[in-house]
Image (cartoon, coloured by chain):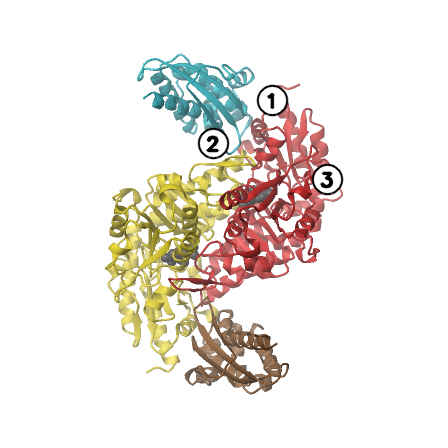
Chain colours: A brown, B cyan, C red, D yellow
Amino acid sequence: MTAQDLDALYQEIILDHYKNPHNKGLREPHEAEVHHVNPTCGDEVTLRVHLTGEPGAETVADVSYDAVGCSISQASASVLTDLVIGRPVDEAMEIHESFLTLMQGKGTVEPDEDVLEDGIAFAGVAKFPARVKCALLSWMAWKDATARVIEEKA
Amino acid sequence: MTAQDLDALYQEIILDHYKNPHNKGLREPHEAEVHHVNPTCGDEVTLRVHLTGEPGAETVADVSYDAVGCSISQASASVLTDLVIGRPVDEAMEIHESFLTLMQGKGTVEPDEDVLEDGIAFAGVAKFPARVKCALLSWMAWKDATARVIEEKA
Amino acid sequence: MEGLLPQLEVVRKDFPILERTLAGGVPLVYLDSANTSQKPQCVIDAMVDHLERHNANVARAMHQLGAEASAAFEDGRDRVASFIGAPSRDEVIFTKNASEALNLVAHTLAWATGDLAVGEGDRVVTTEMEHHSNIVPWQLLTQRTGATLAWFGLTDDYRLDLSNIDELIDERTKVVTLTWVSNMLGTVNPVAAIARRAHEVGALVVVDASQAAPQIPIDLAAMDEAERPDLMVFTGHKVVGPTGIGVLWGRREVLDQLPPFLGGGEMIETVRMERSTYAGIPHKFEAGTPPIAEAVGLGAAVDYLAGLGMEAVHAHERTITAYALDGLATVPGLKVLGPLDVAERGGAISFELDGVHPHDVAQVLDSRGVAVRAGHHCAKPAHARYGVQSTTRMSSYLYTTPSEIDALVEALEYTRSYFKLG
Amino acid sequence: MEGLLPQLEVVRKDFPILERTLAGGVPLVYLDSANTSQKPQCVIDAMVDHLERHNANVARAMHQLGAEASAAFEDGRDRVASFIGAPSRDEVIFTKNASEALNLVAHTLAWATGDLAVGEGDRVVTTEMEHHSNIVPWQLLTQRTGATLAWFGLTDDYRLDLSNIDELIDERTKVVTLTWVSNMLGTVNPVAAIARRAHEVGALVVVDASQAAPQIPIDLAAMDEAERPDLMVFTGHKVVGPTGIGVLWGRREVLDQLPPFLGGGEMIETVRMERSTYAGIPHKFEAGTPPIAEAVGLGAAVDYLAGLGMEAVHAHERTITAYALDGLATVPGLKVLGPLDVAERGGAISFELDGVHPHDVAQVLDSRGVAVRAGHHCAKPAHARYGVQSTTRMSSYLYTTPSEIDALVEALEYTRSYFKLG
Ligand SMILES: Cc1ncc(COP(=O)(O)O)c(C=O)c1O
Ligand SMILES: Cc1ncc(COP(=O)(O)O)c(C=O)c1O
């Protein structure tokens, strides 16, 4: 990795979110709480989801979390919450899908700023297979927690 | 292995013992019977030992056996019985020792015909690590059986 | 000769060992491929390149070498998955050989809870033609759990005796395990039909593909689910890959349900002194540093086979086997133990030569450069079934030529004359 | 610098990977040797020569290639036996890695009968600084048998807390297992004293020498029997050998008494469908085709180390470690987790850098070619003990130069500035 790659990885946006994470800290109310671990490195996140609305048409009312991990995993949790809180679950899942595609694209996917907003800063991460898991940790936790709430309601 | 090596391995003496084995067939009386297997190839020998004489000064009164195996293992059992039957156990053990040394010498040990008689024909076997076990199968069985008789008497 | 691999002489150039001469300057005629196969240069080169340029531990490393090594290792898994048509690449687990893979299954079934648990009163069914590696693990399992071991016998014409299948496979049967292709008799077993019957009673089907994977195109995803094994194993060194690596493929639901086998690094989710939780498949079953360079080599090996085309490899094997059966039939006093119809057999041919013990056959053959195996081939029960203690076995592979078979037949004639038979 | 390997630059030439450059043309500074070591050309060449000229299966083969392969494989065992001063070469068992070796012991103790059996009411003692591979197998054993798992805690100065040794090791204690050298803290444990205590109560002593064997001269035969482990394991890839092979050494009486672990080819004496009997050691524990090329490589590896002299390797490691500790002490906000006295530690140095997460440290270091490990190093409990979730770890080996340590220290300074610290 060159110094240039390093800057591509650690975009200012990422370092900002890392230093000043949004929506951090566990909050009530929530319908599901999950704990995800990256077994390779030990990064951990505890994440809560609060959904409102009718079955089939829920909205992500709140996402809160507590996490230990590197700048990438911390920043990505922060960006996640910014992107999904307040959105219909359907839409949030689509954003999740786009983020996943970006991360798994090995650096070949062009991110859509309209959809991913600050999340586009993670485009550089996709080139570092070892760090993709860091970026995805909270996203996977969110999807898992959301699915649980929806299942339980059903 | 060259054709020459082959002839060194399959000495006439060996092929003779193979075609006309001495002392084959299980006989009474005996104080110990053992069953040894060469796990690599499955060669098997069942061997009986009959000792006479005072503890500490026993004589090998009889050795009888039944065996399935290749020419080397069959011939070696036949030669073994010729060499040890009728001898004091001490002397027989020395012959065993000489044969072992010959077999484990990788072809560098000069056999003593006065001690090993037809056994010197196995000198060529020592150069074939895979066949050394064949040649030793009945010898190990004999030592084992003899040790058992002596232990039990003691 | 119709059916041989196109450009066989060029293919042979891929295998450096085939140019070796043995004692007395005799060229090597390697007919022991069912024991272990030879390695093409591309497999050796892939391992060397890995060790000289990319060596690092996998999964755990954050640096460039670590990323390269991890990618190469997981790429090996992808290639193996595609080689057997695995429905999912995560279902491919690297073990040290086929034997460990079979033991992994047998051991974890002893500790399993729920549906899969094998305990008192349960039955495990194997066959009398298995390799020891597919007998002993099940003996240990049944002895340790109080379950019963039962087995399909063999018919006089070297097939599985299926006459009592409904007694062997009933509601008490938890596992049916069998070899796809016998390493002694060469027999190809009706795996699909047996799997179908086993699945009807809810038994788990374990298939030992150690001799099948080298020869027969396998596409798990394309199989009818009722006929597809639940677990299948094979070994790296018989598919032109390195030693030190084997493969367990398993249906995800089964692997997920089995408890861990070996505990340690890489197979965990989190560890506290009091208790640990485990990673998902495949890592759950890959404790410790895996065979990394070996996975790279195995990836290159199955790619090499795929490049030749497994259909073409299979056709070659059949052609050579038919030619060999014809040749062996000309040797007086020679009796083949196994089916004589190439459509129903693999490439391992075991035989007896009247008046000469198999070791002596192998020894004389070796003096002519012809490498075959003599003994019980880790299939003592099958030998016992046919009243023989050992046999001589020739086994060909994709690099075998008809003239090597001629050399074998000639060397057998020489053996007869050496031992002064007729 | 006094204490370095003589002709270090020449020694480095033996390792082809050390000439690699990484992205951006940066030279490799490999400081991750506790994770896996690099391989000298002679190890790679030995494996290539084996695969290109001598490849065959072992033990079973009657032909020349088979004899050559068997001799090469068993020669690997002889070399390993002499490397650790094993009282007998038959006590050296090849496994796939250190993790399998530890699991082999834990599994067979679960099935053992007699003295060695571990059951309800028995205690197994490990330590809080173990690698996961020396924790999880014992968790599985004790959970499955109803025995209790207990462990030595750690002191604030990174040593084993031996204050409660007499509670932990008493008549109920069947097994005491511990690492010789910690892969996280670097701590060298008082193995001899603990073994002596354990032997007084008749407990079995298992030593994980995975980090010791690469650095410390080992001579089992020379040890006082009361202080000698009963079983000891290490792994090939950390002693400049290949992946896919590990070593279990065990006292003959213990190995003879343990039941078999994996069942299959090579580990049997005879097999009938009803019941089998087993070979003697070492084969009893080596089911299936062993890691043949890997044993050849490992033999070359331990020979290479013996050629340099393990005393010289040890001195080099200490010298570099002392130099590294000095260098790291100059980096503001850097805290080493582990003893600071080189006389009491091995070469793995884990540390925290205030304000930067270990992954980020490792990433920035990597951009400068410096390869270190970040994470829990498969020692989560030890990390938890010191209230950290992960650390950065540098680990040197016989090919490490002082200027590589300088490069690390510089890169750490750069990391601090990159993350805008002070
Ligand atoms: C102390 C210690 N024990 C055990 C192991 C496990 O070795 P392997 O992964 O080769 O099984 C390691 C290395 O990872 C180690 O450092
Ligand atoms: C049918 C069969 N099963 C299992 C094995 C065991 O394979 P491995 O020795 O690689 O574990 C073999 C080969 O020896 C075999 O032929």
Q: Which residue is mark 2?
A: B129
- Residue at x 58% of width, y 73% of height: A105
Measured as percent of width and height from the top left, residue D204 is found at: 33, 47
Q: Dot 3 surroundings within 10 Å: few (below 14), some, or many (20 or more)?
A: some
Label for residue C418? Answer: 1
Residue D131 appears in which quarter of the rendering?
Answer: bottom left
Q: Position of residue A2 (x, y in %)?
A: 46, 74
Looking at the image, residue C115 sits to the left or right of residue A46; the answer is right
Residue C333 in percent (x, y) is at 67, 24
Q: Residue furthest front?
A: C121
Name the residue at 58% across, 25% down.
C357
Chain ID, mark 3 = C
Q: Residues within 10 Å of mark 1 (few under 14, many from 20)?
A: some
**At 67% from the left edge and 41% from the top edge, which residue is drawn?**
C346
| Disc number for residue C342 | 3
Q: How many marks?
A: 3
- Mark 2 surroundings: few (<14), some (14-19) or many (≥20) residues within 10 A: some
Residue D243 appears at what percent x and percent y?
A: 46, 53
Residue type (three-letter) at the residue carrying disc 1: Tyr
Mark 1 vs mark 2, CA separation in Å:
22 Å
Q: Secondary structure at mark 2?
A: helix
Q: Mark 2, chain letter?
A: B
Viewer-side residue, D396 vs C79: C79
Q: Tell me: is circle 3 under 8 Å from ligand 2.
A: no
- Identify the amino acid type marked 2: Pro
Q: Nearer the viewer, mark 1 or mark 3?
A: 3
Q: Secondary structure at mark 1?
A: helix
Q: Quadrant of the C terminus of chain D?
A: bottom left
User: What residue type is disc 3 on?
Assistant: Val
Marks 3, 2 in one chain: no
Location of ligand 2 given as a quarter of the image: top right
